[in-house]
Image (cartoon, rainbow, N blue to C red):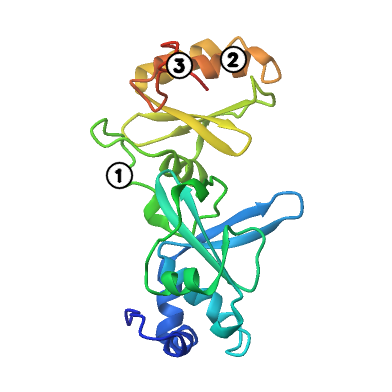
């Protein structure tokens, strides 16, 4: 696969519409994120700004993608600290900046966006299997990000059933890992907020606590939430103002 290096706009357009360009764009593709949940519109996100800009060029004719017309849009999103990029030909209201200069910067591989414009996303339909850490036995020296935890949850089998209720907007789920471990994730809607890792003893204790709860009982979700106290590692952090943990 040929690496893209920007020299001029015309060559960038030709590369974007070549076999090498297609391979380059595909190798940097991460997934789609919703830009308007009410109407289901999405934008595609890429690991590099140049791939995002090239993808936008590959979807349009050279006449549409004329830099003299000053009609380009760019954006960046953060997924657990990792910056991902999007671009479009034309004025896209869902993106933060619309100008040719920013688009050319993207083609040059430069992230010129101010951090205040970057928003977090958790709803990616990931195509990158490397987001799931291997092996799946947790190591406290290398804790996972929420992004990785969600990727694990999508591919793992549930150990305990998901409750048919919510607790303070929390939707808890438990997933089996390797080495007699389990991962407890607390979601807010579809967004993972915190996760914890249980060992075999913690799993058994949590199961014992849940035996007396009906799946439709609010106490089930309450106990699952408090089950984080059984975890030997949790991603939640204390609130510096109160010293308490927050969700």
Labels 2 and 3: the sequence-earlier one: 2
Q: Position of residue 160 (x, y in %)?
A: 54, 27
Q: Residue at x 38, y 20 (%)?
A: 231
Q: Position of residue 166 (x, y in %)?
A: 67, 23
Residue 181 has which mark?
Answer: none
Q: Name above or below for residue 157 compared with residue 115.
A: above
State the CA–CA distance, disc 2 to disc 3: 15 Å
Labels 1 and 2: the sequence-earlier one: 1
Q: Indicate left or right for 165 with 222 as reference.
A: right
Front residue of 113 and 245:
113
State the CA–CA distance, disc 1 to disc 2: 30 Å
Residue identified by numbered label 2: 222
Crowding at dot 2, Cα within 10 Å, few <14 / some 14-19 / many 20+, comes out as some
Disc 1 versus disc 2: nearer the observer: 2
Q: Position of residue 230 (x, y in %)?
A: 40, 15
Q: Name above or below for residue 36 compared with residue 200.
A: below
The quadrant holding residue 198 is: top left
Residue identified by numbered label 3: 245
Badge 2 element:
helix
Labels 1 and 3: the sequence-earlier one: 1
């Amino acid at each position: 696969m040929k690496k893209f290096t920007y020299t001029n706009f015309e060559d960038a357009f030709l590369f974007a519409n070549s076999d090498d360009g297609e391979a380059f764009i595909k190798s940097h593709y991460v997934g789609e994120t919703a830009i308007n949940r009410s109407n289901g519109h999405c934008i595609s996100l890429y690991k590099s700004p140049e791939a995002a800009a090239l993808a936008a060029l590959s979807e349009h004719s050279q006449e549409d993608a004329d830099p003299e017309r000053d009609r380009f849009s760019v954006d960046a999103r953060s997924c657990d600290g990792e910056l991902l990029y999007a671009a479009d030909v034309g004025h896209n209201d869902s993106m933060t900046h619309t100008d040719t200069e920013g688009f050319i910067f993207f083609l040059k591989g430069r992230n010129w966006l101010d951090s205040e414009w970057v928003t977090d996303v958790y709803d990616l339909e990931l195509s990158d299997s490397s987001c799931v850490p291997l092996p799946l036995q947790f190591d406290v020296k290398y804790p996972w990000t929420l992004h990785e935890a969600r990727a694990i949850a999508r591919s793992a089998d549930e150990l305990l059933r998901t409750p048919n209720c919510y607790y303070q907007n929390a939707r808890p789920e438990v997933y089996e890992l390797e080495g007699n471990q389990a991962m407890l994730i607390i979601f807010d809607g579809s967004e993972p907020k915190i996760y914890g890792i249980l060992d075999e003893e913690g799993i058994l204790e949590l199961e014992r606590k849940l035996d007396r709860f009906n799946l439709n009982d609010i106490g089930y979700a309450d106990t699952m939430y408090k089950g984080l106290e059984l975890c030997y590692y949790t991603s939640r952090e204390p609130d510096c103002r109160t010293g308490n943990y927050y969700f």
